[in-house]
Image (spheres, rainbow, N blue to C red):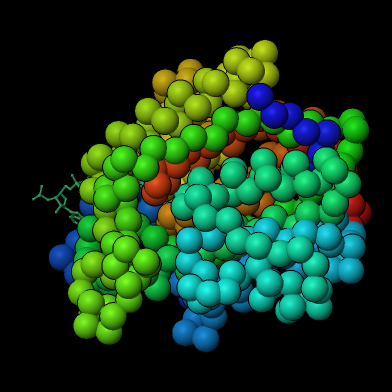
Amino acid sequence: MSTFPVAITGLGSYLPEQVVTNEDFAQRLDTSDEWIRTRTGIRERHYAAPDEATSDLATAAGRSALKDAGLTADDVDVIIVATTTPDHPVPATAPIVAARLGRTCTAFDLNAACSGFVYGLQVGAGMAAGGSTVLLIGAETLTRYVDPDDRSIAVLFGDGAGAVVLQRDDAATIGPFDLGSDGSELEILWMRAGGSREPFDPIAHAEASSRMSMRGGDVYRHAVTRMTSSSQIVLEAAGITIDDIDLMVGHQANLRILEAVGQRLGLPEDRCHVTVDRHGNTSAASIPLALDDARQQGLLDPGARLLLTAFGGGLTWGSCVLTWSGTVGGGQA
Ligand code: UT7
């Protein structure tokens, strides 16, 4: 199982300005703040402005992570954007971000849905271990892909981006990782039309097939099972127990999912970081956004041992253990 002599040396995030509260939904849909809060833990989420696309959010988060690391864009060798909501079907969003940063370096997207950041961390850490300075960004504008009038899905998602800089550091460790997928149940969380199986057409675009659809209960059950078992795999591979984990930073889809995973793992509640209440589900952006939030709350001391775990469409899942590096934020020191 993979571990890498790599440190996160910079961390940054970007949340669009507009905040949409549960009450905003309750005013136009058959829903309530009480239903949304008790079923999901979400109170509010951010929405990208009409002129903001995923690359705009990604570039802002990327710049902030580079500044945090004390680096400039010229220091970056590789840009990875983990996203399911690219600016365009073709090309990838990462080259757009690279151009905005003034770079022509290696740049590619990675799509593992809500597990994208953890997948990107293993890919990026592998490249950083080989000597590259990697900017890994999780960025999403999922609110563009949900039917705003479908109460069962519109209330769940938000927009945002988070980024980390990965650099080789022989005193640091990222990993072990566990990444997995099961494509036999893709329809429980998907957008059916718009790809090669069912190409985009303007008539279909007005229909439900070109919006995100989810069988929430099924996804919920799979998420709890997979995030728990995947976490157990990496803890065992690292030769540690849940008692050695200072903070679990899980994919923020639903507070009840995080609580259920924490309970199954035997993690005390105060060691599970929660941002879903303020961010909603931001898919691949949720973990780096939560990391930045945890740091702002003073929860990431150098040497802190973190468990990251995610689950999303695909189905995909992934977990890893990492020790928070003392070198993070060198640029702001
Ligand atoms: O990021 C990738 C991973 N995604 C996830 O992990 C999401 C996983 N799933 C979930 O978080 C939850 O399943 C949901 C939050 C999506 C739904 O919660 P639930 O407790 O599973 O509710 P439900 O889907 O079983 O719906 C219960 C009822 C239904 O009404 P009936 O059929 O019982 O009359 C829904 O129509 O709640 C209704 N409902 C709502 N009511 C008020 C669904 N959405 C809403 C709403 N407001 N916004």
Quarter of the image where the N terminus is located = top right
> Viewer-proximal residue, 111 or 227?
111
Percent from the top left, x then y, of residue 60?
68, 71
Residue 309 image position (x, y, % from top left): 53, 36
Nearer the observer, 106 or 48: 106
Residue positioned 37% across, 32% down in the render: 224
Q: Position of residue 267 (x, y in %)?
A: 51, 22
Q: Nearer the viewer, residue 36 or 166?
A: 166
| Residue found 78% across the figure and 46% down from its top | 127
Residue 10 vertical placement versus 244 (above, below): below
Q: Is residue 315 above or below residue 99?
A: above
Q: Quadrant of residue 155?
A: bottom left
Q: Looking at the image, can residue 117 be seen?
A: yes
For the point 48% across and 66% down, the residue is 85
Note whether residue 153 is visible: no
Q: Nearer the viewer, residue 234 or 253?
A: 234
* Position in image of residue 3 (x %, y %): 73, 29
